[in-house]
Every structure is written in structure tokens, then in C-alpha cells.
Amino acid sequence: MYVFLDDDGSMRRCYCEGHCPDGQRNGTCELRPGGKCFTTAQIGYDDNGDEYPLRYYGCLPPDEGGIMQCKGHLVPHAEPKSIECCDGSDQCNLHLKPMYPERPTPDVPQYGPFDSPPYIVLLTSVTFCITLCLIVIMICYLRYRKKQVFVNKDYPEKYPAMKIHRHHLIDEKSSGSGSGMPTLVQRTISKQIHMIRSVGKGRYGEVWLARWRSERVAVKVFFTTEEQSWFRETEIYQTVLMRHDNILGFIAADIKGTGSWTQMLLITDYHENGSLFDYLQDHVLDTNSLLTMVLSIARGLAHLHTEIFGTRGKPAIAHRDIKSKNILVKSNLECCIADFGLAVKYFSDTNELDDPRGASLVSTRSGTRRYMAPEILDNSINVRSFEAQKMADMYAFGLVLWEMSRRCITGDKITTADDYQVPYYDCVSSDPGFEEMMQVVCVKNMRPHIPMRWESEYVLKTLSKVMQECWHANPSVRLTALRVKKSLSKLDTDSCIKIV
């Protein structure tokens, strides 16, 4: 132990530990004049390199007790440590509590407010999400444009009806399929169409009289919400061997528009007599014209329902919306069937229906409520059975036959014909609902009234039997389109013999 005296000869002692004289572990030391008691806090390391706190106490010589030495680090370049000093009383350094120094982190880069790792991660994530969204939007847009302009490698084979012209208006070679379908041309027909006036509106769009290459044509402009109907009609019309005298003549289909608006066009033959619904309201029929019209509808329906086998055969097709508004009257008074937006194809080799809406039918109730068969109204129809779909067509055909027969005159000297009415006009409202139709057709089993005057006319009497068999409540009892066609053909022959 060393003793140091102040100027007045008194001795001052400091607590020592780790810095004691003569190698002592702890104890006291005496100050030299001008010296200070100190306490230091520093960080030590064990054999495993783990940190632990250390405190040392002792006497600081006069030459090391300056104010700069007693604040901050004792040895700046050594292990980090802090020191505090005092000289007010004996062992005053026992009460000193210097803070342990923070461990310096050399070579740590300094970040700005937006350069720290969390911000970088956030910025990267946001950038990635935005990029991904843009990619998805771009893909969706390209798919939409691809659908609109039909730019795909399978287009000519898969949709050969798009942008096609009739063989007698352009120079082309026949495909030899017998369908009468013209070949694909590179220019769009919509740019050559001149709209004249609107001639009618329907559930799917508006029909216009137009002129194309000096010939009058009908242009059906579909609503933008009815793209599926437009696509389905086009697909049905371009079916191989579909062309028939009693199926509306198809000319072309096209999409016209810009990014802000789009028109889906279906161009067909134009028939100035309009629909059968319109024609019957303004015209009465004699038995010959009635037979001509009825037989032509039966022929068209039989062609639809019949499958033609061969290398490029025609599938059987069910219309599913037969009514007087979907039948057009030609100038020779024959009729042709139109509007195939709800039609389905049937392939016998796979025993499957090719429905426009994909794997399953949207609803068993397809068509116009007034013309729906009983099995459709009560949801008992097997939507996967093509025979059931055909029989539903025949039920509707029977109602159309009734509409036409009402407008046929009877009697030799006095011409009489009933006013035109739609089926069930006296039983339901003008726009009946499903429940209303089901009560009349299914529950009450009512059918349109057969006038007594038809009994006096051979043709009308025969037709009344045909229509009653067509609208029978049991689908399996109904006549097929082919049977009706043969029966009416025989009736037509017998009628000609009677006239002669």
C-alpha cells in the first residue's frame, strides 16, 4: 500500500479492485497529490467470445486525472470502456456508476430515410406487385383483342364462317362439301356494308336492311351483352352441310368497331316479307299457300334434326327457340328458319351435346316461355338427351302450325279466317311468366282451341291432327320432323290431285 499526502499533509484513500498496488485483488489505495479515485466500466470476453460486463476501481495518478481522461473512453483504440473520477471523500469511487459503452459497429453503411433495408424490401415488393398486375392486365387485354379480331392459328379451320362471302358474289372455288359455304377472304365485309334502315328489334339486337355490292341484305346487330349468341349463331351457320333452302341463307359474320365500341354483325339474306309473325298479321292464307309454308318449315326442321354421316358430315341440331318470330317468309311464300343463338349440336359418335355455354346447360328452361314444352316448364326434361330437345322443338312447331292455320280461309264463296293471335292468347297474359305458363300447359293441360270450321276443310282437318300430335303432353308420342315432312308431302300431293 502506497501513501500520498496532500498539501495539508492529510491522506485520501480510494477503493481498489483490479488496479490495486502490490498485486492485491481488492482493497484500498492512497492518492498522490492531484490524483483521483476512478471507477471504470468495460466489456470483457470469455473463452467462447461471449461478452460480459466488468468494473475496475483504483487510484488515478495526477498526470492521468485530467478532465478529458475522466470522461468517455480511457483508451480509445482499445476495447471500449467508460470511466468516472472523484476526489471528494475516501473511497468515493465506490458510488460511481459509469455506463457500459456501446459496442461500435465498424464499416456499417449509413442509410438515408428511404435507403434502409425495410424500405428497400417494401419498395421491391411494391414494384413487383405493380409489375405483376400490369402483366395480368396486358394478358387479359391481349386475350380480349384476340377474341375480337379472331387472330389465332386455328381460326380458318375452326371458324371458317367468319368474314366469308357468297360464291355468286365473289370469285372463289367450291369446297366440295355441299354446304355452299364460301372461302375465307382477307378483307372484312363490315366496311362494305351500307345500312339503310332498321326493320326490327329482338331480344338479342336489332335487324337492319342494308346494301352490299348492290344487293339487299339483312344485318343483325347484336347487343354487346349478347356476344355468346352472336358467336353461337355464326358457329351454327358455318356447320358443314348446313345450307338448305329452308334455313336462312348466311352470308358473313364480322366484328366492327374501335376500342371504345364494338358491333357484332351477322349478315344474311334479306326477305322483305319479314317474319312469319309479321306476315300473318297482315295476310290471310289459302290452303295451297298454307301447305307451302308449313311443308317448308317441316323440311327445314327435319334438315336441322337429321345427322348426315360422312367424312365431313353434319351433326344433328336442335333449335330450342322455334316460334313464328324466328321463321322468315320468302318471296315464293316458302319459309326459312332463323335465329340459332340457343341451338345445340349432337354428335352420335360421342353421344354428347355441344352446348354453347360449355360443360353444362345454363338452364333447362331455354327458349320463349309461350312456346316452351311442358317438360321444359316443369323442369322434367333431360337436358342431356338430344331426343328430348328435338321433341321440345316439335311441340313449338305444333303451336306455330296452329297460328298459321287460324289465318287460312275456308269455304268456296264466303272467305273466312280468324284474326291473328299468338298461342294461349286467351289463357295467359301478354308476357307470361314460367309459373303462369306451367299452370296452363302442365297443370290444366290446356292447348290452343281448334275451330269447328276446320272440320269442313280437308287440309285444315289434317293439319289439326298433326298439330295435336306435335303438342302432346308426352314427348315420346309427338311426331318427329321427318314424319311431319313426309305426312305433309303426301297431303300436298293429295291436295293437288283433288284440285285437278
Image: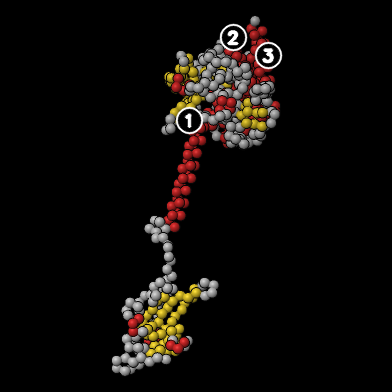
Mark 2, Cα crowd under 10 Å, few <14 / some 14-19 / many 20+, is few
Q: Which of 180 and 409 is in front in this view?
A: 180
* 369 sits left or right of 83 in the view: right
Residues at marks 2 and 1, CA–CA distance in whole angstroms: 49 Å
Q: Nearer the viewer, residue 471 or 267?
A: 267
Rendering coords of residue 283 (x, y %):
52, 16
Q: What residue type is labelled 1?
A: Phe
Rendering coords of residue 328 (x, y %):
54, 19
- Residue for badge 1: 223
* 492 sits left or right of 22 in the view: right
Q: In this view, does 121 lie above or below 328?
A: below
Rendering coords of residue 256 (x, y %):
46, 27
Is residue 259 among the parts visible in the rendering? yes
Please report whichever mark, 2 or 1, sits nearer to the chain's N-terminal start.
1
* 279 sits left or right of 395 in the view: left
Dot 2: what SS? loop
Please report whichever mark, 3 or 1, sits nearer to the chain's N-terminal start.
1
Q: Residue at x 36, y 75 (%)?
A: 72
Q: Which of marks 3 and 1 is in front?
A: 1
Q: Which amino acid does label 3 sit on?
A: Lys
Residues at marks 3 and 2, CA–CA distance in whole angstroms: 23 Å
Q: Which amino acid does label 2 sit on?
A: Asp
Rendering coords of residue 393 (x, y %):
62, 26
Q: Nearer the viewer, mark 2 or mark 1?
A: 1
- Residue for badge 3: 490
Dot 3: what SS? helix
Image quadrant assignment for residue 238 = top right
Is residue 417 among the parts visible in the rendering? no
- Residue for badge 2: 412
Dot 1: what SS? loop
